[in-house]
Structures are given as C-alpha cells and as structure tokens.
C-alpha cells in the first residue's frame, strides 16, 4: 500500500459539519449527508466522520461508529463483542468509505491508528492492500440491471417457468390493495411486522426504533399491501442517480404463503423501478435466491477485521472460516436465451 502523506485528515462528530462536497463523492444514497443526519437522530451509535482533504479539496471520507456485533453471525452461533465499525450505521449494503480508491487506503490506515479495540470495515468492493487486516467475504448485494421499458416487456424477457411463477404469485394478490404514502404514515402495525422479520433474520446488526421509520426523509416512500384492512406486507424504497433502492420491509408471516406476500413485495419493487425509469435496482443483501429468481445477480462484498494486538489478531485469523460468509446458493439466468443483455 502506498500512502499519500499530503492528505489532511480531520475528525467530526456531527454530520451537520461535513464538507459541502461530501455528497459529490457518494455512490449510494445511504452515504449522503441527509441520510447520515437522520441516522444520528434516530439510531445514534457514537458516530464519527473522517474527512481527507488534499489542497483544501475533499477527496475521501469515512463513517465510523460503535456497536456490539455478533462475530459468529455466519457460523450461526452468537458471540457479541464491542467493535468500531467503518460503515453505515444501519443494515444496508453501502460501504462507509467514500472517495477515490487511491485515497481510501490512506484514510483507512489513519483510522486504524486512531481507533482502539476491534475494527470492522464492512461492504466494500475492491480488495484492500493494508498489512495485518483479515479480509473476508460478507453478504453480496443483489443488483438488478434494469434496461426494460415496461412490466410487459420485463415478463416477455423471461423463460416460461419463471414467468409462470410470477403470474401465479400475482393471482394471489389480485384483490390486494396497495397504498403508497410518505413514511409519516408508518404505523405500529408496520413496525410489528418489521420486528417479526428480525425474529427470523440470522444476519441482523441492530434493531431500529419506530421513530427511525416514521421520520425518514420525504424521498423515502412507504408501500403497504392490505387485504380486508389487514396489513400483509410493506416496503420502503427510494430513488437516487437512476438506482432504485429497497431499504426495509415487513411481512405478516401468518398470511405470507396464502398471498405469496414476500414474492409480491419484490415484484412491486420492480414495477416501481420501471415506472420511474431507473436503470438499476438495489435489492440489498440477504434472500439471494428469491431475488435472483426475479432477475437480480449477486455482487460480491468484502469486509475486514483488525486489532492492534497480535494475539487477538491471530485468534481472528485462525477463526476466519467461522467469520466469513461462505454460502454460495445456486444462481440462475431467468431470461430467454435469445434475450439481448445489452
């Protein structure tokens, strides 16, 4: 790794004070100042922000926070340890580092010298060349490259068995009512379904409070599905730079199979993305198989763990197979063989 010693790196404790050019360096809506301010208010985790300037111009940044994390999540055991995390302080797939790759390793090296204890860096794309870090795979992002003008055109690209699966699911939703609102309409019924999802989740980092959802910025939209005034499922989505993002959702598990609610929830996200002419859908992490059967493909993400103490670092190195994400579910191409993939 070649460090750039001409960078001036500073630390801030409030997103309000971030450089005006911070958003220019962001490649995800979850890294933007507006969303970071929201997280500070409703999911405070001792956030800090590192900024690197070169010739007084912002060239890189990082979000750092503190949380107890189950280091054995992927091994299906539980061992929660306090950590300093370089990432976004909610369970999304965006990395906590912004800026050009040539400066990011310098700012990471600086953070590792400043912070203490276990350091975990989440959800980056390109291998990092810093000595003594233990680099591993984490959950992939499920991304759908959407170059389709209409829902009908989308169905027409699909192989028969996958198209039939979607049509059967839609039949179960034929009498379901969709309500689209600002997140200010989020209710305790929505929140309880979110908690139900967390109960069965094996990869959760945190439990967000009710206020996090009801106070989301206006660009985030709440989509709710009802049958006879009973909430079946919901999701929150937003759009930024032609990317359509699925943030969080909830499912009524008692009625899930009768209405094929989970699948229909994903189907609606695709329809929304087509309606606003998005070129990409970011379905987030988890549920790779279900999202793949609708057209999404996995984009690998990496993480590293680090500790200054050699003994602790060695323990993590020996335990690497327990810490890394190693599942590789079978992915398929749902499109017809003669479909032009652009």
Image (tube, rainbow, N blue to C red):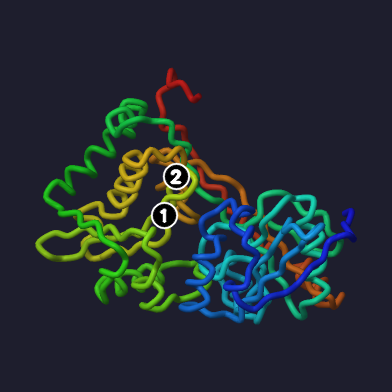
Q: Is residue 88 above or below residue 245?
A: below
| Quarter of the image where one finds residue 193 | bottom left
- Whole-number angstrom distance, CA of label 2 to CA of label 1: 8 Å
Is residue 270 shown left or right of residue 187? right
Position of the N terminus by quadrant: bottom right
Which of the marked residues, 2 or 1, is nearer the chain's N terminus?
1
| Quarter of the image where one finds residue 261 | bottom left
Q: Which residue is mark 2?
A: 281
Quick check: can you spot residue 322? no
Q: Where is residue 94 drawn, in percent x and y?
A: 57, 57
Q: Where is residue 259 drawn, in percent x and y?
A: 20, 53
Q: Where is residue 299 drawn, in percent x and y?
A: 58, 45
For the residue labelled by badge 1, is the local secondary structure a helix, a strand or a loop? Answer: strand
User: What residue is shown at x 86% (from left), y 61% (from top)?
Assistant: 131
Is residue 221 shown left or right of residue 50? left
Q: Neighbour class for label 2 at 10 Å: few (<14), some, many (≥20)?
A: many
User: What residue is shown at x 58% (from left), y 64% (from top)?
Assistant: 74
Q: Where is residue 62 drawn, in percent x and y?
A: 68, 65
The residue closer to the viewer here, 169 or 67, is 67
The residue closer to the viewer here, 165 or 307, is 307
For the residue labelled by badge 2, is the local secondary structure a helix, a strand or a loop? Answer: strand
Q: Is residue 224 above or below residue 46?
A: above
Q: Decide: marks 2, 1 in contact (CB < 8 A)?
A: yes
Q: Which residue is mark 1?
A: 246
């Amino acid at each position: 790794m070649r460090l750039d010693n001409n960078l001036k790196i500073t630390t801030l404790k409030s997103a309000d004070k971030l450089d005006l050019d911070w958003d220019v360096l962001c490649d995800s809506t979850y890294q933007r100042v507006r969303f970071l301010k929201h997280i500070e208010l409703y999911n405070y985790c001792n956030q800090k922000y590192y900024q690197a300037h070169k010739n007084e111009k912002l060239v890189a940044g990082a979000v750092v926070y503190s949380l107890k994390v189950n280091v054995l999540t992927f091994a299906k055991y539980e061992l929660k340890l306090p950590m300093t995390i370089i990432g976004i302080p909610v369970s999304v797939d965006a990395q906590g580092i912004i800026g050009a790759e040539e400066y990011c390793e310098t700012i990471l090296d600086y953070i590792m010298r400043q912070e203490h204890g276990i350091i975990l860096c989440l959800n980056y794309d390109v291998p990092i060349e810093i000595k003594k870090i233990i680099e591993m795979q984490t959950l992939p992002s499920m991304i759908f490259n959407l170059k389709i003008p209409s829902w009908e055109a989308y169905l027409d690209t699909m192989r028969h068995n996958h198209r039939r699966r979607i049509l059967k699911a839609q039949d179960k939703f034929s009498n379901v009512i969709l309500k689209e609102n600002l997140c200010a309409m989020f209710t305790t019924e929505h929140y309880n379904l979110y908690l139900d999802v967390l109960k069965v989740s094996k990869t959760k980092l945190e439990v967000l409070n009710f206020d996090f959802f009801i106070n989301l910025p206006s660009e985030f939209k709440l989509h709710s599905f009802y049958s006879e005034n009973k909430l079946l499922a919901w999701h929150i989505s937003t759009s930024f730079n032609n990317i359509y993002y699925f943030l969080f959702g909830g499912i009524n598990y008692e009625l899930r199979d009768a209405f094929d609610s989970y699948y229909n929830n994903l189907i609606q996200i695709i329809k929304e993305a087509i309606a606003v002419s998005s070129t990409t859908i970011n379905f987030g992490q988890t549920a790779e198989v279900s999202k793949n059967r609708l057209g999404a493909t996995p984009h690998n993400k990496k993480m590293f763990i680090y500790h200054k103490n050699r003994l602790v670092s060695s323990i993590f190195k020996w335990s690497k197979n327990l810490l890394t994400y190693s599942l590789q579910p079978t992915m398929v191409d749902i499109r017809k063989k003669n479909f032009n993939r652009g």
